[in-house]
Image (cartoon, helix red, strand yellow):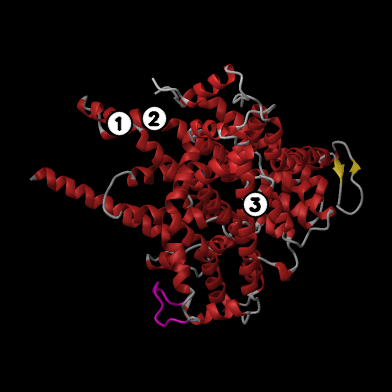
Amino acid sequence: MGLSVGDAVRTARTSGQKLIRLERKHNGPAYVFMTPWLLGMILLTAGSMLFTIYLAFTNYDLLSQPRWGGLQNFRQLISDPNFWTSIRVTLIYVLVSVPVRLVAALFVATLVNKHVRGMGIYRALIYLPSLVGGSVGASIGWRVLFDQNGPINAVLRIFGIQGPVWLGNPATALIVLVLLSAWQFGSEMVIFLAGLKQIPTYLYEAATIDGATLWQRYRRITLPMLSPIIFFNLLMGTISSFMVFTQVYVITDGGPMNSTLFYVLYLYQQGFQYFHMGYAAAMAVVLLIIVAICTGFLFLTSKFWVSYDV
Amino acid sequence: MTRTWRARWKTFIRHAALIIVSFLMIYPILWMFFASFKPDDQIFSTSSLIPDKWTFQHYIDGLTGRSGTNFGPMFVHSFEIACVVVIGSLFSSTITGFAFGRLEFTARRFLFGFMLATMMLPAQVVLIPQYIIFHKLNLINTFVPLMLPSFLGTTPFFIYLMVQFVRGIPKDLDEAAEIDGCNPFRLFLYVILPLTRPALITISIFSFYWTWNDFFGQAIYLNNPNLFTVPIGLNMFMDNMGNSQWGDLFAMSIVSIIPVVIIFVIFQRYLVEGIATQGLKN
């Protein structure tokens, strides 16, 4: 058996030569390497978070000093109808768009999980929207797509349907934004696809021999095997759906009649249009709590449907 | 005979489904693409996707400022910011990833756990103090607030990616290097860094296109029209333009999407792998 490098070092050490101790802590150099990140963490992440929490209890407009107001901001939030509207709008959006996107992603992932000619091109075309979908350019395209005289209504007209004024109607404006989110299922699809490829094929073969139907195989093998990945996508999709901003700002800017007043949009208006920094900070703290509760809730339910042992 | 028929039929169905899905997915971009080449009076009146008469006027108007908003400098700004952020992200993620992935130091586990936790932290929670800091430093209406954070490793995903990658590099290399008298700095620069190329590419792609597409940060920190970037410019142009300028708007939107599409075409593999590992590692 040849000596490994580690053995050589150990030999060197026992023979009393000048040694290099591999398991030694490199505190000095390590913290040199860590300095930028530590600075960022202290100033921009952890410090900022604590500062947000402090600001939430103050009245601050950026010009004068923050004035301590205790729970004033939170009391004001509770009695602010726009705050409740924004919570309602965002929750509806999360509850509808996340499942829609996951189902679309899972369905299409199954569709593209086979080697047929031209698959690379299909996958690329399907994936592309999730790359550009969050940008202002794509949001503009989406806005025009659902314009009163836009292509969607033009297609509907061919079938003799008078399309609605999508973005001018409180009942349909949110639908447009949900559809925009559904359009961007590409990254979830890619993650599902990677998961599908990891399921051993012998499971399906064995099930087929035992006479399992396509649906049974899907229900009993694919879904349980994918459940950790479904959970991951659900978690990440939920968190990111709470943060949606650009599309809303560009397409509806909260209207019509606050029907798309998303939480982060309202936070932006309070903080960066009216410069109610304390109020916006209070909203950020509430957002953090809501996201934490949702995350915790998802983790709790995961015990019942996510199987890590298969 | 019947078996091959069934197999063929299945393949046909799959292709048909794939073509329909792909077409639906790409249609919004395709529509805007072709509309940007239509004369203004045809954009909303013609029902055909492909223009009868092609015009490049919208692109010329938009990029030279004849449409009232000069997008030329905005593309330069967006590009500048994105490139600096790529450099910053590479800088911070490599050194931090190396320290987390290779060096033993006090509080390493705690800090690493902390970093993972910040991956779930909504950006809005830290945004207000960050804005106040940059405001106090008189850096509003400069590119600094958009560039500086990347040098301080504020995107934990990149560091995580790099840590995973560094951990995958065989330890024998370090040991051999240490015997040759390499200190951690030389080890990083000459042994580890050259091997992280795939991770560097992935991080560059993500940081570029995220920054290119970013709107929130740029809208907050930039309100001087001379400093506007493409996303802010597009949004402002749409709000202020007349009814006859849809073509210009579409043309500039298409140009704003092109860099991301090019990156996608060239680096598709890295992008897809980056996203896939994100899901599987957890």
Identify the residue shown where x is 76% and y is 62%.
Answer: B141
In the rendering, at what x and y percent does residue B91 appear?
63, 48
Q: Determine which of the numbered discs, if any, sits on residue B202 in the image.
A: none
Let me know if residue B47 is in the magenta part: yes
Chain under callout 1: A
In the rendered view, tell whether residue A248 sits above or below residue B31: above
The residue nearer to you, when weighing B115 against B219, is: B115
Q: Position of B48 compared to B91: left or right? A: left
Q: Position of A135 compared to A219: left or right? A: right
Q: Quadrant of residue B231?
A: bottom right
Whichever of labels 1 and 2 marks the residue nearer the N terminus, that label is 1
Cβ atoms under marks 1 and 2 closer than 8 Å: no
Residue holding disc 1: A217
Residue holding disc 2: A225
Q: Position of B101 compared to B55: left or right? A: right
Magenta: predominant secondary structure element?
loop
In the rendering, at what x and y percent does residue B181 appear?
60, 34
Query: In the image, which residues are magenta?
Result: B45-55
Residue A289 visible, this angle: no
Cα separation between marks 1 and 2:
11 Å
Residue B205 visible, this angle: yes
Residue holding disc 3: B88
Identify the residue shown where x is 25% and y is 27%.
Answer: A207
Cα separation between marks 1 and 3:
48 Å
In the rendering, at what x and y percent does residue A62 appear?
86, 52
Q: Name which residue type carries label 2.
A: Met
Q: Quadrant of residue A158?
A: bottom left
Q: Name which residue type carries label 1.
A: Arg
Chain under callout 3: B
The residue nearer to you, when weighing A220 against B121, is: B121
